[in-house]
Image: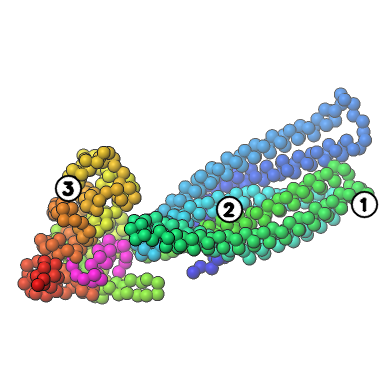
Amino acid sequence: MMDKPSLTRRTLHYYWLVTRRHLGLFTGLVVSTIGFVALLQYGNPYLMSLVVDRVSEGLTVAPDQVFSAFGPLVLALVLVNLVGQACSKLQDYTLWKLEIAVNYDLATMAFDALANQSMSFHSNRFGGTLVSQTTKFLSGYNQLVEVVMFPFLPVICSVVCTVAFLAPVVPLYVVILLVLLAGYGTISYVMYKRILHLNEAAAGAQNALSGELSDAVTNILAVKTYGREDYERGLFDAANREVVAKDSKRMWSSMARGIITAAVTVVIMSVVSVFIAGGNAWFGITPGVLIMMFTYTNTVANQFNFINTGLQRINRAFGDASGLTAVLDEPRLVADSPGARPLVVTEGAIDFSDIGFCYQDGGAKTCVFDDFNLHIPGGQRVGLVGMSGAGKTTLTKLLLRLADIQEGRITVDGQSIADVTQQSLRRQIAYVPQEALLFHRTIAENIGYGKPDATMDEIREAARLANALEFIERLPQGFDTVTGERGIKLSGGQRQRIAIARAMLANAPILVLDEATSALDSESEALVQEALGRLMRGRTSIVVAHRLSTVASLDRIVVLSDGRVVEDGPHAQLVERNGDYAKLWSMQTGAYLE
């Protein structure tokens, strides 16, 4: 686990990566902020102090001489305000523009990181938590930029301007003021460091709450059918109370810091009051300079007062961003090799050679394959069967490079899949899992996902071949029907036929079916089986199945047990051998029933 200072540095690293792409906007924001503060908050009081001093000199100015006496100062005031307001509006524009541009880049960075991570990564995380972390990562940047541009940059500008204007006329006062301000800044920073971890803990609690909510909502059918609403509410309430506890601890720490820094502010204003009261008598300070001293000191004190809130927001920003920063730093378990080239499939021959593969889950290591070998000629239809845990689904995941082998080599037409790009590999393999993977989009969009440039005629033909056209046309919106999240508005058989239509449209030379009919009723299974028969024609096909009727008609059946091939051959030959396959076949066909 990365320590908190390193996590903060990494967050700043990612934020700077995207900020430097828009350096013109960032520079414009800095310059306009400095101009706004220097001109309106310091230029105005300085010019007014000159007017007051001129008036306090006691010289009588005739009414017709006012503009000749004060005209240059009035003109300077008008120009200062005009340019200052222009800087203010430029500040608004550059800030908005920068945040819009950078948020786009950060969102893209987050999406790319999540989309290109391995399935092992996603299997160990809540989808809702990742979404929450991404949202907070973006808002953390906005908070950080706004804090830098409003409390902190103006504070630096205020100190510089105060010293520049007052040091020549009241040097002793400036020295005392700087000592007090240094003490204020030191106290604020020390307390900021102490409560940084509280903000990260609060953000972590909020992410956990989002994860609990996401888990319950995603599995709402299970919650309702088992009457476990109260149980899930208890889990959510526990996570919610943890958020309250962490936020409360953060609040009290911030309040304590605020009280201490407020006391320092009182001391600063007390010192300026003494100087203003006795400044003329003790040091001969003019009324204009006294006004300038009070105005500048009050401005600086107020700006420093905002540091407390600013540090609190920085704490929150880094705490919110920490979750996704850790994700961005996470190494990709499956990555393209340097110089990876596109896969070119001619025959579709697949070879698993001397494969060694173990799962790593936390500290536990589970080995599935050790020196595993299997050759599948191009165009052959192969069934993978065996008891649960034999390695059937794992083998298909390794072929798709959803996980990487530790030993051996997997090739397609002699090309190692480790040396080709992952996207080109998966575009050559049509994958139909047990649970159809549908988006919350229209049926047409879901089918067309396998071929983005498909015409409506092509989509309809794929639906027809998948035995899906009839039920789609009966729907009120037809192909424009939105399927709902994960296709929840459709039956299991309907979802599966749409997934098959997608695979047909993709027209990939290699086909992987992972328990594609196991959860279907007899009528749906018959329709899906017929559609799968069309889909497998002329393609290298790997069919994972528990129902042996699904694979009985295939060219070849491979029986796996504990990560090894124990039998291999056509259905009839395996039944005659009276081995593991024959026993499984007898159990499923009722030969063992008395």
Q: Residues within 10 Å of mark 1 (few under 14, many from 20)?
A: few
Q: Residue 437 sits in which quadrant?
A: bottom left
Q: What type is the residue that disc 3 sits on? A: Asn
Residue drawn at (68%, 38%), measured in percent from left and top?
Answer: 84
Res 55 label: none
- Which is more foreground, mark 2 or mark 3? 3
Q: Residue 318 sits in which quadrant?
A: bottom right
Q: Residues within 10 Å of mark 3 (few under 14, many from 20)?
A: many
Q: Residue 593 sits in which quadrant?
A: bottom left
Q: Earlier in the sequence, mark 2 or mark 3?
A: 2
**Residue beneath disc 1:** 282
3D distance between C-alphas at marks 2 and 3:
55 Å
**Residue beneath disc 2:** 144
Position of residue 125 measured from the top left corner of the image (x, y, whole percent): 41, 62
Residue drawn at (62%, 51%), measured in percent from left and top?
Answer: 148
Q: Is residue 82 left or right of residue 334?
A: right
Res 467 label: 3
Which quadrant, please, contains the C terminus?
A: bottom left
